[in-house]
Amino acid sequence: MGVLDIEVWGKDSKKHEERLGTCKVDIAALPLRQVNCLELPLDSCPGSLLLLVTLTPSAGVSISDLCVCPLADASERKQAAQRYCLQNSLKDMKDIGLLQVKVLKAVDLLAADFSGKSDPFCLLELGNDRLQTHTIYKTLNPEWNKVFTFPVKDIHDVLEVTVFDEDGDKPPDFLGKVAIPLLSIQDGQTNCYVLKNKDLEQAFKGVIYLEMDLIYNPVKASIRAFTPRERRFAEDSRKLSKKILSRDIDRVKRITMAIWNTIQFLKSCFQWESMLRSTIAFAVFLVTVWNFELYMIPLALLLLFLYNFIRPTKGKAGRTQDRQHSTDNDEEEEEDDKESEKKGLIERIYMVQDIVSTVQNILEELASFGERIKNTFNWTVPFLSFLACVILAVATIMLYFIPLRYIILIWGINKFTKKLRNPYAIDNNELLDFLSRVPSDVQKVCNEWSPPTGPPAWESGWPQHQRSARLCQGVIEIKDQKILKEAWLAGRWQEKALSQSMR
């Protein structure tokens, strides 16, 4: 262990970076497996950096040549398999498994230099662990033949392999990237992966050959799935992009449409649009509610999993359709980008305004819904809050004396027979109807009224002794402000009535 060099950088609103200071930590002098609180002064500027440093030996991390592959030795592989066998499931819960990656070669990479060549090296990332190969200069078909070993902390992590072009003192140029979920790894097989762009959405240029082996404990991996994921220390801040914003809106629309179609299907059962479907739904509702037990909830979800497992073709077709939809969207977006380049600034502004307007409306609806719930409990409208208290009191008494099964049966029978009893009835949601009467915070501010502090505008130009109200029969001197206002309103009303009668 040596010395850890730390640099502190700052970034302003214009994204200009400036180094604020440096400091060093002597790692060799720190004890192992203890939290060390350090306050280090910065060298080139006033101020200090407060650190919490814990040194933990990392087992399993290694870099070696292809001829010295750790898992190639039968004894080492057997030892690793014994380490992560089921008998050791309750030992060292954070040590879930071991991943070995052979970075063999890359073919037909992008030429990043003026000479038509590149200086490629490969960076591997698994969680917060980062290892890289050496650089091979002046080639588009590098052969690294290196073996990397990672400790697996979460079986749901994704191995990211990125190829860069070394550019001296400048930041390296991007040549391609591939992301491989650990659960999709095929042990001991050499696979060819097409390099993609930074967003992993489209194919880039070139391919990379990798061979991977994964050994893990399934019990530890299952328990780890119910704990918080490890936070990435180095994450790229995503910039505002019309393409990404449009894609995310489209994703939300698809989910919303699926929910909306489900709601419409349930409404169609209540509306008796199909006699057979509504009859079956009504019978299923009655039988289910009358015989309902809590174990039926996980059983229903289990049957849903089983149904989708028996019919995987539908899921595969859906995934293929999603990929095709994504590809079509990418092609459409590329065409739109080309067309937008030809369009003027006004058209582009309108396109952005439509997207922002949609997002604004969605956010406004969500914010208003939450604020209405809050204002109901805050007694913003005392009548509605008192009404809610009465309903909750009645519901408390009913739930205390009447079993929940009977209440749900009464509600369901009312819903199913509402259209039969009144064919012209409009379906509604009583809770949403109630909340629509409660003002949101914006409506509350808009509805606020405060009395004027000065004299009314219609008498502001009069002297104090001439402030009066003119009725149809003459002018009466009134000094009281309240009576003056009422008299003026009465005079305006009589003038209006007189003008209408004269017409």
Image: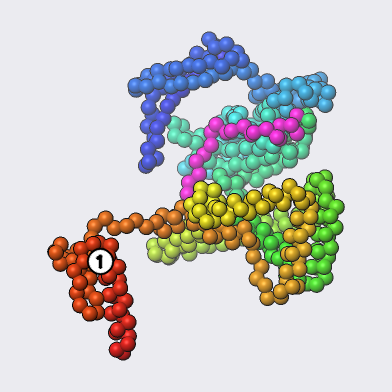
The secondary structure that dominates the magenta segment is: loop
Would you place residue 299 above or below residue 436 in this image? above
* Residue, disc 1: 484
**Which residue is rendered at x = 64% and y = 62% of the image?**
429
Range drawn in magenta: 220-246
Q: Is residue 99 magenta?
A: no
Instruction: Confirm whether residue 333 shows in the render.
Output: no
Quarter of the picture containing the C terminus is bottom left
**Which residue is rendered at x = 50% and y = 59% of the image?**
361
User: Front-most of 348 and 258?
Assistant: 258
**Which residue is rendered at x = 71% and y = 35% of the image?**
225
Residues packed near mark 1 inside 10 Å, few (<14), some (14 to 19) or many (20 plus): many
Badge 1 amino acid: Leu
Would you place residue 408 above or below residue 473 in this image? above
The percent coordinates of residue 166 (x first, y second) are 51, 34
**Which residue is rendered at x = 70% and y = 49% of the image?**
397
Instruction: Confirm whether residue 180 shows in the render.
Output: yes
In this image, 250 relative to 9: left or right? Answer: right
User: Front-most of 202 and 170?
Assistant: 202
The percent coordinates of residue 261 (x first, y second) are 68, 63
In this image, 350 relative to 225: left or right? Answer: left
Q: Is residue 243 magenta?
A: yes
